[in-house]
Image (cartoon, rainbow, N blue to C red):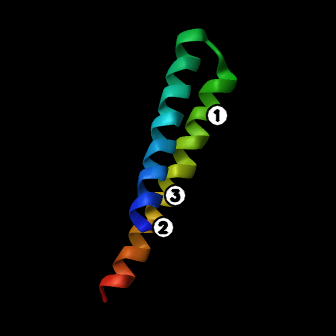
Amino acid sequence: MADESKAEHKAEELKGKAKEKAGEATDNEQWQAEGRAEQTKSSLKQAGEKVKDAFKKK
């Protein structure tokens, strides 16, 4: 389960990067902002997974 979550979060991060780059290429500020937001959301989720993993090891 945890590995699936990690993969989903990484995919979400890559999707955000792609959206941000598409926004830059088309000069679409909304896509740029959405892409950055998706990346931030994904990063927070990944950090949460790392904290869970740290507690499981103890």
Q: Quarter of the image containing the C terminus?
A: bottom left
Q: Earlier in the sequence, mark 3 or mark 1?
A: 1
Residue type marked 3: Leu
What is the number of the mark on residue 34? 1
Residue at 47%, 60% (x, y): give it.
5
Residue at 53%, 35% (x, y): give it.
16
What is the number of the mark on residue 48? 2
Residue at 51%, 35% (x, y): give it.
15
Whether tag 3 and tag 2 are in contact, CB under 8 A, the answer is yes
**Outermost residue toward the right?**
30
Describe residue 44's horizontal placement relative to residue 51 as left or right: right
Tell me residue 25's x, y (percent).
53, 11
Image-quadrant location for residue 55: bottom left
Q: Alpha-carbon distance for marks 1 and 2?
A: 21 Å
Is disc 3 surrounded by few (<14), some (14 to 19) or many (20+) residues within 10 Å? Answer: few
Q: Quarter of the image containing the N terminus?
A: bottom left
- Secondary structure beneath dot 3 equals helix
Picture layout, residue 1 above or below residue 28:
below
Query: Pointer 3: what residue?
Result: 44
Describe residue 30's horizontal placement relative to residue 23 as left or right: right
Is disc 1 surrounded by few (<14), some (14 to 19) or many (20+) residues within 10 Å? Answer: some
Picture layout, residue 25 above or below residue 40:
above
Describe residue 23's horizontal placement relative to residue 21 as left or right: right
Tell me residue 19's x, y (percent).
56, 27
Q: Earlier in the sequence, mark 1 or mark 2?
A: 1
Image-quadrant location for residue 46: bottom left
- Secondary structure beneath dot 1 equals helix
Residue type marked 2: Gly
